[in-house]
Protein backbone atom coordinates (compact mmCIF):
# COMPACT_ATOMS: atom_id res chain seq x y z
CA UNK A 1 0.00 0.00 0.00
CA UNK A 2 2.94 2.30 0.63
CA UNK A 3 3.95 2.16 -3.05
CA UNK A 4 0.42 3.20 -4.04
CA UNK A 5 0.65 6.15 -1.68
CA UNK A 6 4.05 7.15 -3.08
CA UNK A 7 2.78 6.85 -6.65
CA UNK A 8 -0.33 8.87 -5.78
CA UNK A 9 1.78 11.59 -4.21
CA UNK A 10 3.94 11.65 -7.33
CA UNK A 11 0.90 11.98 -9.58
CA UNK A 12 -0.55 14.73 -7.40
CA UNK A 13 2.75 16.60 -7.59
CA UNK A 14 2.75 16.17 -11.37
CA UNK A 15 -0.79 17.55 -11.66
CA UNK A 16 0.12 20.47 -9.40
CA UNK A 17 3.19 21.27 -11.50
CA UNK A 18 1.11 21.11 -14.68
CA UNK A 19 -1.38 23.58 -13.23
CA UNK A 20 1.43 25.90 -12.20
CA UNK A 21 2.81 25.76 -15.77
CA UNK A 22 -0.69 26.42 -17.10
CA UNK A 23 -0.97 29.48 -14.89
CA UNK A 24 2.39 30.76 -16.16
CA UNK A 25 1.33 30.11 -19.76
CA UNK A 26 -1.93 31.99 -19.25
CA UNK A 27 -0.09 35.01 -17.86
CA UNK A 28 2.47 34.95 -20.70
CA UNK A 29 -0.28 34.70 -23.31
CA UNK A 30 -2.13 37.62 -21.74
CA UNK A 31 1.03 39.73 -21.72
CA UNK A 32 1.87 38.84 -25.33
CA UNK A 33 -1.70 39.64 -26.40
CA UNK A 34 -1.53 43.01 -24.68
CA UNK A 35 1.76 43.84 -26.41
CA UNK A 36 0.33 42.85 -29.80
CA UNK A 37 -2.73 45.01 -29.17
CA UNK A 38 -0.58 47.99 -28.20
CA UNK A 39 1.66 47.52 -31.24
CA UNK A 40 -1.40 47.42 -33.50
CA UNK A 41 -2.87 50.52 -31.90
CA UNK A 42 0.40 52.40 -32.31
CA UNK A 43 0.66 51.34 -35.96
CA UNK A 44 -2.94 52.31 -36.71
CA UNK A 45 -2.56 55.66 -34.95
CA UNK A 46 0.55 56.50 -36.96
CA UNK A 47 -1.08 55.32 -40.19
CA UNK A 48 -4.16 57.50 -39.60
CA UNK A 49 -2.01 60.45 -38.58
CA UNK A 50 0.02 60.04 -41.77
CA UNK A 51 -3.12 59.89 -43.89
CA UNK A 52 -4.50 62.97 -42.16
CA UNK A 53 -1.33 65.03 -42.65
CA UNK A 54 -0.75 63.77 -46.20
CA UNK A 55 2.51 61.90 -45.60
CA UNK A 56 0.70 58.61 -46.33
CA UNK A 57 -1.21 58.84 -49.59
CA UNK A 58 -2.41 56.83 -52.52
CA UNK A 59 -5.35 56.38 -54.88
CA UNK A 60 -6.50 53.15 -53.21
CA UNK A 61 -5.95 51.06 -50.09
CA UNK A 62 -3.09 49.07 -51.62
CA UNK A 63 -1.15 52.20 -52.56
CA UNK A 64 -1.73 53.74 -49.13
CA UNK A 65 -0.58 50.51 -47.49
CA UNK A 66 2.60 50.47 -49.58
CA UNK A 67 3.26 54.10 -48.74
CA UNK A 68 2.72 53.46 -45.03
CA UNK A 69 5.15 50.53 -45.13
CA UNK A 70 7.80 52.83 -46.60
CA UNK A 71 7.21 55.64 -44.10
CA UNK A 72 6.75 53.65 -40.86
CA UNK A 73 8.45 50.28 -41.50
CA UNK A 74 9.55 49.90 -37.88
CA UNK A 75 5.97 49.90 -36.62
CA UNK A 76 5.02 47.20 -39.11
CA UNK A 77 7.98 45.13 -37.94
CA UNK A 78 7.10 45.69 -34.29
CA UNK A 79 3.53 44.62 -34.90
CA UNK A 80 4.63 41.52 -36.82
CA UNK A 81 7.02 40.52 -34.04
CA UNK A 82 4.32 41.08 -31.40
CA UNK A 83 1.94 38.86 -33.37
CA UNK A 84 4.62 36.16 -33.61
CA UNK A 85 5.15 36.26 -29.84
CA UNK A 86 1.41 36.11 -29.27
CA UNK A 87 1.08 33.04 -31.49
CA UNK A 88 3.99 31.38 -29.69
CA UNK A 89 2.45 32.12 -26.30
CA UNK A 90 -0.90 30.75 -27.50
CA UNK A 91 0.79 27.53 -28.61
CA UNK A 92 2.43 27.15 -25.19
CA UNK A 93 -0.90 27.82 -23.49
CA UNK A 94 -2.64 25.18 -25.60
CA UNK A 95 0.19 22.75 -24.93
CA UNK A 96 -0.05 23.39 -21.18
CA UNK A 97 -3.78 22.71 -21.27
CA UNK A 98 -3.20 19.37 -22.99
CA UNK A 99 -0.51 18.46 -20.45
CA UNK A 100 -2.89 19.22 -17.57
CA UNK A 101 -5.57 17.03 -19.11
CA UNK A 102 -3.10 14.17 -19.64
CA UNK A 103 -1.91 14.39 -16.04
CA UNK A 104 -5.47 14.45 -14.75
CA UNK A 105 -6.32 11.42 -16.88
CA UNK A 106 -3.29 9.52 -15.54
CA UNK A 107 -4.34 10.35 -11.99
CA UNK A 108 -7.90 9.19 -12.64
CA UNK A 109 -6.71 5.93 -14.20
CA UNK A 110 -4.50 5.32 -11.18
CA UNK A 111 -7.40 6.01 -8.82
CA UNK A 112 -9.60 3.55 -10.71
CA UNK A 113 -6.85 0.93 -10.71
CA UNK A 114 -6.34 1.23 -6.95
CA UNK A 115 -10.10 1.12 -6.34
CA UNK A 116 -10.36 -2.01 -8.50
CA UNK A 117 -7.53 -3.67 -6.59
CA UNK A 118 -9.09 -2.76 -3.26
CA UNK A 119 -12.50 -4.07 -4.34
CA UNK A 120 -10.98 -7.38 -5.47
CA UNK A 121 -8.85 -8.12 -2.58
Image: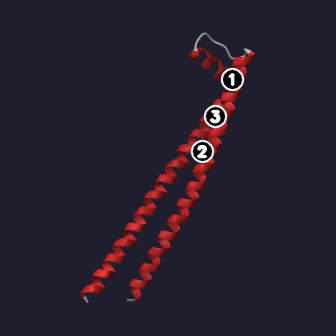
Residue found 64% across the figure and 30% down from its top: 76
Query: Residue 72's spot in the image, x, y percent?
Result: 69, 25
Q: Outermost residue toward the left? A: 120
| Element type where label 2 sits in the image | helix
Residue found 53% across the figure and 44% down from its top: 87
95, 31: nearer the viewer = 31
Q: Which residue is mark 1?
A: 48
Residue found 41% across the figure and 67% down from its top: 104
> First in sequence: mark 1 or mark 3?
3
Q: Which residue is mark 3?
A: 40
Q: Is residue 56 left or right of residue 85?
A: right
Tag 1 and tag 2, C-beta contact below 8 Å = no
Quarter of the C terminus within the rendering = bottom left
Spatial CA distance of label 2 from label 3 is 11 Å
What numbered label is drawn on residue 33? 2
Query: Residue 50's spot in the image, x, y percent?
Result: 71, 20
Tell me the colour scheme of the image: secondary structure
Residue found 67% across the figure and 30% down from its top: 43
State which quadrant residue 46 falls in.
top right
Amino acid sequence: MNTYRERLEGLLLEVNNCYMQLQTSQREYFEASELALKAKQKLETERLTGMANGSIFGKNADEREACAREIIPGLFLDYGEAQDKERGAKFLLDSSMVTVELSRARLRIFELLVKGLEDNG
